[in-house]
Image (cartoon, rainbow, N blue to C red):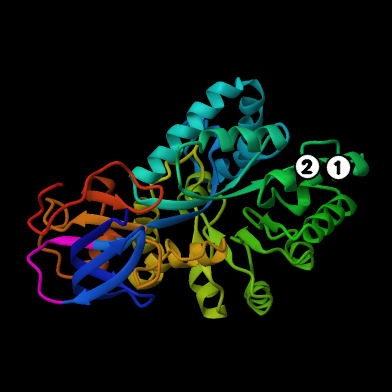
Amino acid sequence: MPSEKIIPGKILYGPDLEVIEGNVCVKDDVIVEVSEEKVDSQNIILPCFINAHTHIGDSVYKDPPLGTYDRFLLKHDLDALVKPPNGLKHRILRRTPEPELVIGMKKTVCDMINTGTCGFADFRESGVPGILALKEALNETNIKTRIFGRPTGDQNEIESVIEEVERLLVNSDGLGISGVNDLDSRMIRSIVSTTKLNKKFFAIHCAEKERKGIEETLELGPDLLVHMNRATEGDLKRTADMDIPIVVCPRSNFLTGAGMAPVAKMFEAGISVAVGTDNVMLNSVNMFEEMQLLSKVFGLEDKHIFRMCTLNGAKALNFVGCGIIEEGYNSNIMILNGNSNNLSHSSDILSSVVRRARPDDILAVIGPGSSPRPTPTSEGRII
């Protein structure tokens, strides 16, 4: 039986995020009408986030000791934390029983949904078993997902690794490789060729802490780049010419001292930039915090920041029908309490959302994969 909701408030409408006052009409999880009219509501209605780069397998081990908070020393600790096959993260994944891994990932998925995220991409470690564990964690949720697998075999055995890649591609949306510097060049070319023959997605980390490997990475023709912290203007121009989106991970890179992505230069080059929270081991999946860092440290325009965290991520991951509030799009909608102690008296709705909004301002998340929170009425009551 068709279900219909009328949601009143101030709406961040369309790709330009125009703030309009009115109603959003949702029927069967689709936005059927957005009407501009005077309403008696302090709700703020906005599209849900897309978290374009995560590693949620390490949800079982959070906030590891980094040894020191001297940023220069932290730069040398990054490989010890996350580099395959023997970084701290990978050792933890190997020794943790699968049921415990599944529970940890399930909690992180619930955390994403409850903090306003309707879709994410995960670079899944541990081969096919890792992919299947994530799929188990996703049971009974409708959050949009891109699962990018990663081979675990001996890179000197090309035939066996390619056989593993074939199995990975059957069970996932594509491959998510740690970087060209971690694999034999002949091996990675074979992996990419196999991925493209299977018409699957190829994503790769690049230039997180050093520029080495950018040319080789771009020659592979990836569908998605992650980080690119050390990219030059020439690298960015080539990336833009190839129409490859980039995912930046501000909080993660800030914490590890890997370097801050040249986001403003990425925009100037014409690159579509999305945002990810990276390893759960190091950071929560709270996209509000990513927006605040991008605003207060990078000094980017509010509109650019919000698009990075929503529409740009949806486009980068080919999530159809989400990322903006507009007729015909899916109803992946977040409703904030504009009269909360934090958001009341906002003089600029979009700026307040980007610079100060928090998960506790959320009244409801509506649409596929939404949280069980009820829907607020125009008077702010919950139904």
Residue drawn at 51 percent across, 38 percent down: 138
Query: Which segment is the magenta one?
Result: 37-44
| Residue 64 can be seen in this image | no
| Residue 333 can be seen in this image | yes
Is 327 colored magenta in this rendering?
Answer: no
Marks 2 and 1: in contact by CB < 8 Å? yes
Nearer to me, 212 or 12: 12
Amino acid under disc 2? Arg
What main secondary structure does the magenta stretch of the protein show?
loop
Nearer to me, 152 or 374: 374
Mark 2 residue crowding within 10 angstroms, few (<14) / some (14–19) / many (20+): some
Residue 205 at x, y percent in the picture: 66, 54
**Farthest-out residue, front:** 1
Nearer to me, 276 or 192: 192
Q: Which residue is mark 1?
A: 163
Q: CA distance from mark 1 to mark 2?
A: 7 Å
Q: State the mark number for residue 34.
A: none
Nearer to me, 327 or 108: 327
